Amino acid sequence: MSSTSGQPQFRYTQTPSKVLHLRNLPWECTDEELVELCKPFGKIVNTKCNVGANRNQAFVEFSDLNQAISMVSYYASSSEPAQVRGKTVYIQYSNRQEIVNNKSSGDVAGNVLLVTIEGVEAGDVSIDVIHLVFSAFGFVHKIATFEKAAGFQALIQFTDAETAASARNALDGRSIPRYLLPEHITSCHLRISYSAHTDLNIKFQSHRSRDYTNPYLPVNPSAIEGTLQPTLGPDGKKKEPESNVLLASIENLQYAVTVDVIHTVFSAFGTVQKIAMFEKNGGMQALVQYTDVTTAAVAKEALEGHCIYDGGYCTW
């Protein structure tokens, strides 16, 4: 069953849950509107509105699993899609079995998130990957990573609690995309809670900590390199692990370099899926994602050390 827009309204392969995940809701949809849509199918015990970067998603928890199943089944077979304020709403089972109240004891919303990255060791997930994932929800001020008994963790500071909440709601329980992880990592789940910190104290830019608000912060060279033993190539030089994501540092910056400029340059070698730009140590950097490792390797070989503009301005 597809909606009139051509998008699938349901995912049949999901495990049923008494919590339903609703997408494509109108802006600032209210709890009352959600209850009105869902109450014909059973008792609603909890809701969570305005989730996600665009605040157009929500979760609804029924008191009984069969009630959630009946709602999904009804709209899967109905010629009329679920709608709120005339917008078609896409419904699927949540990967959670209950809605956890963000304001529970010891979990008061703040602007700093405590992220536990399960299934990995320090060094498996770089700080640049963490920055890329969480920057989708707003400006990341600072990141500090460390190892605890609970595993590899990171503190991530946003501008405000609202931005942090949108990142937490969207990413808690999810996995970092597979293409951003080393090949030997098969599973990597994020467990996210709020930290009591409000402003992280970052002393150095390194592979363990970054302050994206202070380009003049000193760099710790040994920390940037990390403590892992490098892989050596046949020529005895350090060999970088291959990836379909390139990290481009733009030097000798004389003209503006935008996402469009980077897309134009890197698209010459293959389809560019994603681009993320950020400032680091006073310079401009970009993460450029291709569909495969081979295309990324060709682009790296062709572009490294070359100029974007005639006259020698802006080198990679």
Image (cartoon, rainbow, N blue to C red):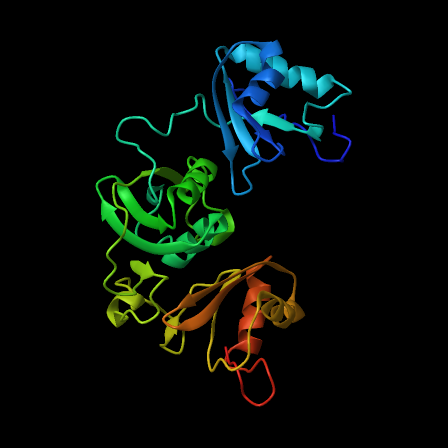
Q: On the rendered structure, is 89 left or right of 62?
A: right
Find residue 274 and report its horizontal and vertical position in percent: 57, 57
Q: How many badges with numbers are in the image? A: 0
Q: Residue furthest bottom?
A: 311
Residue 13 visible, this orientation: no
Find residue 47 and report its horizontal and vertical position in percent: 49, 22
Looking at the picture, tell me which residue is in the foreground, 306 or 196.
196
Compared with residue 42, is residue 153 higher up or lower down, i.e. above or below? below
Find residue 146 and report its horizontal and vertical position in percent: 25, 51
Residue 309 visible, this orientation: yes
The structure residue drawn at horizontal position 32% and vertical position 60%, both measured from the top left corner, is 210
Compared with residue 241, is residue 49 higher up or lower down, i.e. above or below? above
Q: On the rendered structure, is 70 left or right of 151?
A: right
Looking at the picture, tell me which residue is in the foreground, 124 or 286.
286
Compared with residue 310, is residue 245 higher up or lower down, i.e. above or below? above
Find residue 259 and report its horizontal and vertical position in percent: 58, 65
> Which quadrant of the figure has residue 269?
bottom right
The structure residue drawn at horizontal position 30% and vertical position 65%, both measured from the top left corner, is 205
The structure residue drawn at horizontal position 38% and vertical position 73%, both measured from the top left corner, is 282
Compared with residue 47, is residue 181 higher up or lower down, i.e. above or below? below
- Quarter occupied by the N terminus: top right
Q: On the rendered structure, is 299 left or right of 286?
A: right
The structure residue drawn at horizontal position 52% and vertical position 23%, both measured from the top left corner, is 31
Looking at the picture, tell me which residue is in the foreground, 294 or 39.
39
